[in-house]
Image (tube, rainbow, N blue to C red):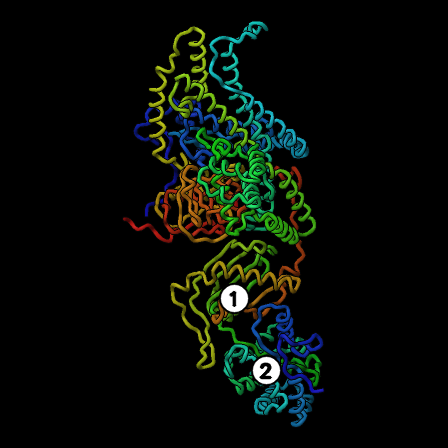
Amino acid sequence: MTDKKKKFISPYEHTAPKGSEGWKELYPYFLVFQEQLKEQEEDKFFFCDSQHWPNVFKPFDAMTVEFAVKCLSQYNSRHYVIPPANGVDFKIHNGYCYMSPVAVSPELIEGRVPEFMERAGYYFQNWNELLENWHKKVKRVIDDMESIHFEPLPDRVDIQVIKDGVGLDPTFQMINDYNKLISLCYETWQYHFEFLNLGYAAYLDFFGFCKEVFPGIPDLSVAKMVQGIDVDLFRPDDELKKLAKLAISFGLEKCFEKKDVNEALHCIALEENGGQWLQAWEKAKHPWFNYTSGNGFYSSDKYWIEHLDIPYGYLKNYVEKLQRGEVIDRPTEALEAERDRITTEYAESLDDEARAIFEGKLGLARVVFPYVENHNFYIEHWAMGVFWRKTRELSRMLKEQGFWQQESDMYYFRREEILQVLFDYGNSWAVGVPAVGPAVLQEEISRRKKIVDALATAPPQPAFNNPPKVVTEPFTIMLWGITTEAVESWLGGDEKSSHMKGMAASPGLVEGYARIINDASELDQLKQGEILVTRVTAPSWAPVFNKIVATVTDIGGMMSHAAIVCREYGLPAVTGTGSASTQIKTGMKIRVDGGKGTVEILEELVEA
Amino acid sequence: MKPTYSLFFKDAKPEQLESLGGKGKSLASMSQADLPVPQGFCVTTDAFVAFIQDLMTAKGLFASLAKLDTKNMGSLDKLSGEIRSQILNKTIAADIQEDILASYRSLCEMYGKEGELPVAVRSSATAEDLPDASFAGQQDTYLWVVGEDEVLSHIKMCWASLYTSRAIAYRKDHNIPEEDIHMSVVVQKMVNARVAGVTMTLNPTNGDRTKIAIEASYGLGESVVSGTVTPDNYLMDKVIFELVESSIQDKKIALIPDPANKRVIEIEVDPVKATEACLTRDELIFISKIAKRIEKHYGCPQDIEWALDADAEGEEAFTLLQSRPETVWSNKKTETKKHYMSGMQGLVGSLINPLSAKK
């Protein structure tokens, strides 16, 4: 046994994997640890946010963490003046991102209260009207993105441009469109946090009150009282279930024996009621197939609407289940009855005065909480889905112009570098000479690919520098599940252990065989009855939750995606274990206790 | 009409409950509410009255009791001893005996142990006949009684326990007429407890009614109740039945039945087992669920004695031995009432001081 470490490694001492030399140039200068600021940066405690960004960033994709965390921060610090919390400082190191919440000095907290009351109070009081407006704003952003198209520059400027005396060429439009697309993405992330921080604040208030009046109340009880039943986030999966039932009622089962989605759709089209079913399928696609199998933060995310084989796979599975007479519906009525029972029983144990306050706080939490669950569909899935689709359209167009060889190559450039490429393209078009890019960019892309691949060979550190004595920052606890205990367990986490501790995120005790999933693309390896063990899950993995019997994640709190989905599906989940996905191997027999938050390896693998 | 001398818990009608004594009445009401008490029957107060009247009148003992000066310890002890030996030596009248033995036989049959079922024989007095609650605890309880003759003689031992010097003196001092006293005797299937304990349907440390506190140790529950071992301590959430806290103790000894010698013996627990939790998670859950049902039945927080019967599996093993109202927190008006902030004030408070949110 070695002594427990007292602090985490400094990012300045944490070396990058071989072959990744020069990685810092891939990211904005203000998002990497700069030598000149060593002393200042080593003073802060950073933890890795692999909950949202589990994989190494390609340069373009780093925009997601930049926009998201900056916008989260601005609402704490500048919009609502959250008394104890400023923004969250963030850096990219060796390809992964690390967060450092910025607390407000204790002596300044009191002074911020009146402003917070006025600003946040206004949102709480006008929540529903403001939220209705939010939906309009987000829909407008999505429509604006949809209206953007990137097409090759024409041989001549259109005659109408001449006749109307427009006096502008198509490169002007193309550059504007590119800037507009980036700006719309930025706008999306502004809206993402307009309500989220306040939603968490109200939840936290109810949470804290419950902990006070029901000492020791399981976190799960609080979550269950607040949790929504009919959540938009589950609509895509629900739509597939509806389609599966419709297929059965129309007698289309045999078409679902086809492996390929196009063959299946072709088969359906030839059936008697096929046309009607296809109409329903088309209707479900918009908007519900704007749904990623990742989490919306990566250009490599696969969205259903562009990869119909993904929803088809789930749909096929549902049809087969129905044929076997299995029930595929979420037990929404039972969940609702259970939520009412739990709430009533806790409320009844209080005296009249405390009960009135309990009901007030619960009421607010229930008004605001649907946003916390639903925003995900509108932002990460729908809006980001359209955004990535449009960037791919651009990359494809530039590929056709010879700037690179693969559609995914564009993402090896930072967003401002793309602007240069567009000017190169426009310039060559105007001057009438070949563009420079096609001659030089491929080499740079290959160099950067090697760097990114090299970075991906090493997992991130759980944290950097000195841990805080106690973690008190409310959002750190709620969003990331970073508690004093969690940080301590990471420090002791070097030792291999067959016992792991995490958050008791969804109750139930299950034993079974583990399947390690490192990426959404590996999801099809999951077999019926296995336990999903992964760094982090995305809510869009919902359909696989019909196959598995429990979930274990490295990172995530009570309100993480995995926790919410597992509770919804009635599966045990332990989140925030720190290292389960590296300590457990596929095929090991493990025991998951979602009520206690423990995971135990029961049978090691026999070495071949 | 011939009085009813013996009554199964399940069969007692409302108007008959008084004839079962305190403990018997409570067992009958629990049994009839489908709470998992061990099966059994009561030898009614009518049986006691018939037996005692017969004896006392024949021997002129009521008169001796009336004349007795309780300050004279010598004569008090002498009379007490005489009455008790008379009780033990007198044969129970045939009609009473037949009723009791018929009940014992059918109890044996229920468990497929013809004439051999070990039972607990306990006195079930009516409260006003007893000096105080702690005295009630000294009322005789006989465990692992097996066979018809043994059952009969232990019933008489229970009856005799009403005539200790202290009990006689108490009644005299409080002007309770000897002719009015009643006692019932409970004869109940002996639970072969592998684990036993007590459960409170609130958190005894702070009165929080959304928790269930469970104390448990190996073997018969007497070791937990009497405090001869430090039991495991578990705190369960009463609403969603999650384990909130637990403290596992070194439970070195256990009381177990020694059926051959019809007694209970103290054994040392295997050292590894002693330090392990004596209840599984599933057991904690069903104990909590049943405790919650018992509380609901009585309409107030309860203090429950129970055992897990080694002869049964799963939830069926749960055996309710006794349930009383919890008194400490139930009688306490929350005098130190906390003031909670509501609305935005409360929200600000939660954000500034989220420490409570961490636990």
Amino acid carrying label 2: it is: Ser
Indicate the quadrant where residue B156 lies.
Answer: bottom right
Gap in angstroms between the C-alphas marked 1 and 2: 29 Å
Q: Position of residue A347 (x, y in %)?
A: 65, 51
- At label 2, counting other C-alpha atoms closer than 10 Å, the crowd grade (few under 14, some 14-19, many 20 or more) is many
Amino acid carrying label 1: it is: Gly
Which residue position holds label 1? B197
Indicate the quadrant where residue B276 lies.
Answer: bottom left
Q: Nearer the viewer, residue B321 or A568?
A: A568
Q: Position of residue A343 (x, y in %)?
A: 63, 50
Q: Is residue A352 visible?
A: yes
Dot 1 or dot 2: first in sequence order is 2
Q: Quadrant of the N terminus of chain B?
A: bottom right
Residue B115 disc label: none
Q: Is residue B227 visible?
A: no
Which residue position holds label 2? B103
Q: Position of residue A121 (x, y in %)?
A: 66, 33
The chain carrying label 1 is B
The chain carrying label 2 is B
Q: Secondary structure at mark 2?
A: helix
